[in-house]
Image: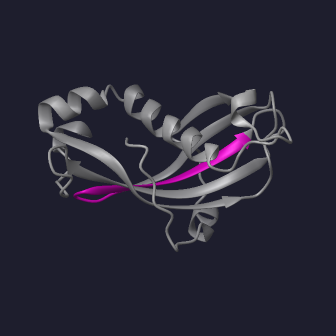
Amino acid sequence: MSSSTNTSKGTCESAEKTHSDPVFSWPVRIYWEDTDAGGVVYYANYLRFLERARTEWLRSLGIDQSQVRERHGVVFVVREAAIEYLAPAKLDDTLEATIHTIERRSASMTFTQRILRSGDGAVLVIASVRVACVAASDFKPQRIPDSLFS
């Protein structure tokens, strides 16, 4: 999934209300490069952690994004993201980036994602992210190939 990101005017309230067991979880450790001068994770880095979880979720399903581009001529890009920052992560924290719910439409998917601190399970971030399937050649919307999620 592309790392291009647009912030939407949406809210994450629905993400809070639809909490369920995650369908996928990916571990994240916080390094110096992830933090600001105060040793706190820089806010934009949470988007990278969410991106990694979505990418690794696809890999866990046997979906390689490079092969999807080659075989189907499509890529996934972030169409919108709404994110709530509830508590900070700090240097050396271990986190879990999760995907809680998925809505699939013909040309897009919406994910409810969270970032939790591994030790105490504290929810640090709640996000709603919608990715669009687009043609790799011109970035026009395309139907998600049925063979990807059948």
Kindly identify the residue that appears in the image at 64 percent across and 56 percent down. 126
> In the visual, does 12 lie left or right of 92?
left
Where is 39 relative to 13, above or below? above
The C terminus: image quadrant: top left
Instruction: Tell me the quarter of the picture where residue 42 sits.
Output: top right
Figure quadrant of the N terminus: top left
* x and y, in percent, of residue 100 in the image: 54, 49
Give the quadrant of residue 36: top right
The total number of labels drawn is: 0
Residue at the spot x=59%, y=52% of the render? Answer: 20
Q: Is residue 28 above or below residue 83?
A: above
- The majority secondary structure of the magenta stretch comes to strand
* Residue 30 appears anywhere in the view: no
Q: Is residue 41 left or right of residue 81?
A: right
Q: Nearer the viewer, residue 7 or 127?
A: 7
- Name the residue furthest bottom: 9
Nearer to us in this view, 140 or 115: 140
- The image shows residue 125 at horizontal and vertical percentages of 68, 52
Query: Can residue 138 be seen from the camera position used here?
Result: yes
Front in this rendered view, residue 62 or 131? 131
- Residue plotted at (57% across, 69% down): 14
Q: Which residues are magenta?
A: 104-116
Q: Does the stretch in magenta take in 85?
A: no
**Is 107 included in the stretch rendered in magenta?**
yes
Q: Position of residue 136 (x, y in %)?
A: 19, 43
Give x and y (percent) for residue 130. 41, 58
